[in-house]
Amino acid sequence: MSQPSRALPQSKETLLKSYTKRLKDDVKSILDNFTEILKCSKVEDETQVSRVTQVVQYQYESNVRAANIVRAGESLMKLVSDIKEFLILNDFPSVNASISDRTARLTTIQQQTDKQLMSLKEDMAVTLYELEESYYSSQYH
């Protein structure tokens, strides 16, 4: 948050703790599964299980662990999305500042447009007056 000294309501504090726990759990899941995949790649010399059976077992375990890594990665992406949403919805000073800046820019544009319209109006009035004067003073009137 932009002001760490400000106390958060209980629900926000709980939500932030939940985000922290999700982050730690997902990163731990990725690390543990990756470590286990590396352990599967280690070739053992003598086992009671045939080599083909062992390879198939390691392949299946690696696939499951890779799927777990993907799931944890997707969960982290969802967590990032949730945190962004939390910041957008709960960072009122920033939102208010953004709205104020936008309002000021639009007010400036409006004032410039009004000035241009007034200038155009004055030019048209002068031109129309000159046209009327020219028309009424001509022989075609």
Image: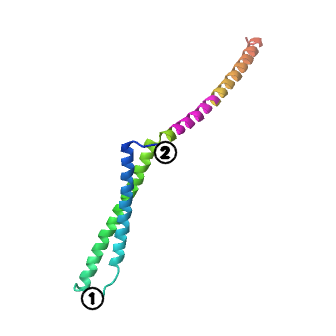
Check disc 1: other Cα within 10 Å, few if <14, some if 14-19, many if 20+: few
Point 37% across, 64% down: residue: 28
Point 28% across, 80% down: residue: 55
Nearer the observer, 64 or 82:
82
Dot 2 or dot 1, earlier in sequence? 2
Q: Which amino acid does label 2 sit on?
A: Ser
Taking the image as shown, residue 112 lies to the left or right of residue 20, namely right
**Measured along the vertical axis of the image, is residue 54 above or below residue 91?**
below
Taking the image as shown, residue 102 lies to the left or right of residue 41, namely right
Looking at the rendered structure, the secondary structure element under dot 1 is: loop
Q: Does the magenta stretch include residue 141?
A: no
Nearer the observer, 102 or 113:
102
Q: Residue 46 carries which label?
A: 1
Q: Residue 126 carries which label?
A: none
Q: Is the magenta stretch mostly helix, strand or loop?
A: helix
**Measured along the vertical axis of the image, is residue 140 above or below residue 8?**
above
What's the magenta region?
A: 96-111
Taking the image as shown, residue 88 lies to the left or right of residue 53, namely right
Point 36% across, 52% down: residue: 18
Residue 83 locus on image (x, y percent): 42, 50
Residue 60 locus on image (x, y percent): 27, 73
Point 34% across, 68% down: residue: 66
Residue 126 locus on image (x, y percent): 73, 19
Taking the image as shown, residue 79 lies to the left or right of residue 116, namely left
Q: Name the residue under label 2.
A: 5
Q: What residue type is labelled 1?
A: Glu
